[in-house]
Image (cartoon, rainbow, N blue to C red):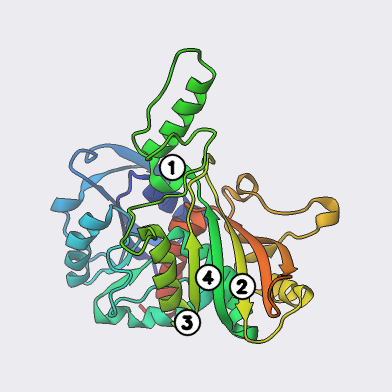
Amino acid sequence: MKKWNVAIAGATGNVGREILKILQERDFPVHELHLLASARSAGTTMSYKDRDLVVKDLSQFDFKGVHIGLFSPGASVSSRFAPVAAQAGCVVVDNTSFFRMDPDVPLVVPEVNAGAIAEYKKKGIIANPNCSTIQMVVALKPIHDAAIIKRVVVATYQAVSGAGKEAIDELFEQTRAFYTPGKTVPPKKFAKEIAFNVIPHIDQFLENGYTKEEMKMVNETQKILDPAIRVAPTTVRVPVFNGHSEALTIETEKKLSAAEARQLLAQAPGIEVIDDPASLAYATPRFASSKDATFVSRIREDTSCENGLQMWVVSDNLRKGAALNAVQIAEVLIRSHL
């Protein structure tokens, strides 16, 4: 089996560490592995397959001879270094938001639009969608293929891990402080206290009243799945450490019964259906954490709409919502394109 030279940019962050773990779990055929981060993190070590690898300074790294770069260093850093890597012949799979809406950069979820990967040759870059978009389009794909989706209304319940390690620490410290008389931990990462609270605000507010996170779901769904689908999102941060949940209301051109939808979803790649109200069987973020699948539950017909369905979708936002999706793209690359 041919082996490949791989670089992880942003290796010391939450997503970078998850990529490293997934490469090992899936036995990705790595020849040389380069771990890259900021100058501040350079010189630290990380473990991979019982070896200690030294983290290198991304700004000083030469990508010549590297086949695949898995990037998650932040949008501003990717905007600078992803083109440098691509120019050196490295195919970049970028987890940040910077390239997602570039018309010359494919935006890919392998279960949904793997064929778009071939377009990487335009710039040498493939974009990974936003975490909340990924799990939604995985669940929408089989429904859209069967009945053509006209409109989606989605409310998200997004874990703090999607906002980084500082956000995880803030939830932990605020939760502990709640039970310590006289102690408070003011919000820094979030606009409001996140412990024992929900915050209907992720990313910046825009002039249209939506947030950037919400418009990502609109624009990315249309680019990945179908530009004709209308999406009405409300994104909410909840006091959950890991795992995003979404409540979807879907309107289709052709009527699908709940039983038909359940069968389609159960047969679709990357999806596991857990849906038995009689035994209280449904997915939760705690259940989905550290698992690869997108879980779909509470599949039912919308009583307010003739051709409507409702469902509950849960996934690990650090895995399928980021690191796993990037590695799956790389797997398609080496299997079909490189």
Looking at the picture, how far across and down is residue 15, in whole percent?
40, 50
- Residue named by callout 3: 226
Q: Residue furthest top?
A: 181
Q: For the residues marked 3 and 1, what is the alpha-carbon distance in whole angstroms? A: 44 Å
Q: For the residues marked 2 and 4, what is the alpha-carbon distance in whole angstroms? A: 12 Å
Question: Could you tell me which residue is drawn at 52 percent across and 76 percent down?
Answer: 112
- Disc 2 marks a residue whose amino acid type is Ile
Which mark is on residue 250? Answer: 2
The label nearer to you, 2 versus 4, is 2
Q: Residue furthest left?
A: 60
- Residue named by callout 4: 137
Q: Quadrant of residue 150?
A: bottom right
Dot placed on the residue nearer the N-terminal end, 1 or 2: 1
The answer to whether the residues at label 2 and label 4 have Cβ atoms under 8 Å apart is no
Which mark is on residue 50? Answer: 1
Q: Which quadrant, please, contains the C terminus? A: bottom left
Dot placed on the residue nearer the N-terminal end, 3 or 1: 1
Q: For the residues marked 1 and 4, what is the alpha-carbon distance in whole angstroms? A: 36 Å
Secondary structure category for the residue under label 1: loop
The label nearer to you, 3 versus 2, is 2
Instruction: In the rendered view, tell whether residue 66 sits above or below residue 23.
Output: below
The label nearer to you, 3 versus 1, is 3
The label nearer to you, 1 versus 2, is 2
Looking at the picture, how far across and down is residue 295, in whole percent?
64, 60
Q: Nearer the viewer, residue 4 or 199?
A: 199
- Disc 4 marks a residue whose amino acid type is Val
The answer to whether the residues at label 3 and label 1 have Cβ atoms under 8 Å apart is no
